[in-house]
């Protein structure tokens, strides 16, 4: 966050020592304010509508099928790996997806476990185990760590994998994943959460694993929205950019943090970075800062890991937060709007019948 310009030129009567002390005081105040408002360099990049093509950010235009390495998930076996083998984890993941019909109801298999390290796996190399969890939001884990040679992933069927962000203005529902056979999970018109939202374990498995961990935190103290900017006269109600309009400010988003106080946050690796659409939920850098987009932001050029989307019927809650009273500020020479009163939220699991 940049600070307001100050006149640093001393008057002819001001001693140099006073000038230096003043500058030092401003520096201390600036550092403190930066910490409180959590305006990290990663946040500033998002605020400015960054449109670069940074190296290291994964780009995917096809269907996602990814898992977490060095992790062995447990569960009742649906397909035995000793008799079910593939050459890659992606093939194993797709086999698991094929167990989902796309109709109402859970998948016949929601967990895949693959052994892909030829040296470490030995005779188990290529084994693909398809399993079924008792609770998809609390999957059973057999083992994890560098010595584990397995790669595991989750697939959620329709009505499964929904979490909610409870605010005083309503609950945003987030679907961890909506399985759409033969289609890229982000290509369809995103369904916003109640703020519930859809999580995407097959595209952003590490992000989703973190969200599932947060479900065990009773209060999630520190989780809050602190920045809010509406669509202004730049995007229409469907999130489409208006011809000849600027790209902000305002930037059509609500921004917050998903970090519970008292817990140690582990940076999340950059995962899949599709175009930001209205309803997209994405990390800023490696988290825990995140934002919910109120518009389609193609100008950001796949710069952020998208790990969920808000159900359309819940976007009115996000819009309501975006229009709460704010104060103007300047972060890294960019005008932003900070909520006068941050909006805390609690993350909780959503039952299937409320999805």
Image (cartoon, rainbow, N blue to C red):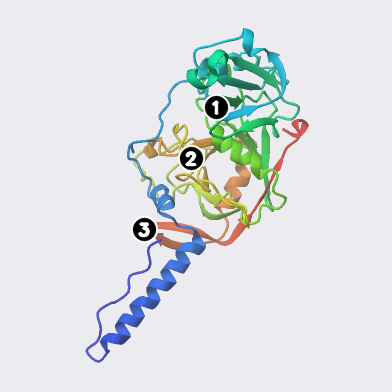
Q: Quadrant of residue 92?
A: top right
Q: Identify the disc placed on residue 295.
A: 2
- Residue 34 appears in the rendering: yes
Q: Secondary structure at mark 3?
A: loop
Q: Give the percent coordinates (x, y) of residue 181.
A: 58, 16
Apparent side of residue 189 relative to residue 329 in the rendered image (left or right) = right
Q: Is residue 207 above or below residue 96?
A: below
Looking at this view, is 54 or 276 the one in front?
Answer: 54
User: Residue, x 53% and y 46% (percent of image)?
Assistant: 266
| Left or right relative to 216: residue 56 | left
Q: Read off the residue under disc 3.
A: 332
**338 and 199: which one is in front?**
199
Q: Is residue 122 left or right of residue 219?
A: left
User: Disc 1 or 2, which lies upstream in sequence?
Assistant: 1
The alpha-carbon separation of the residues under discs 2 and 3 comes to 23 Å
Q: Residue 106, which numbered label?
A: none
Whole-percent x and y of residue 140?
Answer: 70, 30
């Amino acid at each position: 966050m940049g600070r307001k310009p100050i006149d640093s030129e001393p008057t002819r009567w001001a001693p140099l020592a006073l000038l230096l002390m003043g500058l030092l005081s401003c520096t201390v105040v600036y550092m403190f304010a930066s910490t409180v408002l959590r305006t990290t360099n990663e946040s500033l990049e998002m605020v400015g509508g960054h449109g670069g093509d940074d190296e290291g950010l994964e780009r995917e235009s096809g269907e996602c099928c990814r898992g977490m390495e060095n992790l062995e998930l447990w569960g009742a076996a649906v397909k035995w790996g000793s008799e079910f083998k593939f050459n890659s984890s992606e093939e194993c993941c797709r086999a698991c997806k094929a167990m989902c019909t796309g109709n109402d109801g859970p998948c016949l298999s929601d967990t895949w476990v693959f052994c892909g390290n030829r040296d470490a796996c030995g005779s188990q190399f290529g084994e693909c185990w398809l399993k079924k969890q008792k609770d998809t939001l609390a999957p059973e884990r057999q083992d994890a760590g560098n010595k584990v040679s397995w790669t595991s992933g989750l697939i959620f069927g329709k009505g499964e994998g929904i979490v909610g962000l409870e605010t005083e203005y309503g609950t945003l529902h987030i679907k961890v994943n909506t399985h759409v056979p033969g289609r890229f999970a982000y290509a369809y018109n995103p369904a916003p959460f109640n703020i519930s939202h859809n999580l995407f374990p097959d595209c952003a498995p590490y992000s989703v694993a973190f969200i599932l961990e947060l479900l065990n935190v009773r209060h999630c103290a520190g989780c809050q929205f602190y920045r809010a900017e509406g669509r202004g006269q730049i995007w229409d109600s469907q999130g489409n950019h208006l011809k000849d309009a600027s790209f902000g400010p305002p930037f059509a988003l609500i921004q917050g943090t998903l970090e519970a106080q008292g817990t140690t946050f582990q940076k999340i690796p950059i995962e899949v970075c599709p175009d930001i659409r209205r309803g997209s939920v994405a990390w800023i850098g490696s988290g825990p800062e995140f934002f919910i987009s109120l518009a389609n932001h193609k100008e950001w050029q796949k710069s952020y890991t998208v790990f969920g989307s808000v159900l359309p019927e819940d976007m009115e809650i996000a819009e309501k937060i975006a229009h709460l009273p704010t104060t103007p500020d300047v972060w890294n020479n960019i005008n932003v709007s900070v909520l006068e009163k941050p909006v805390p939220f609690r993350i909780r699991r959503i039952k299937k019948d409320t999805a």
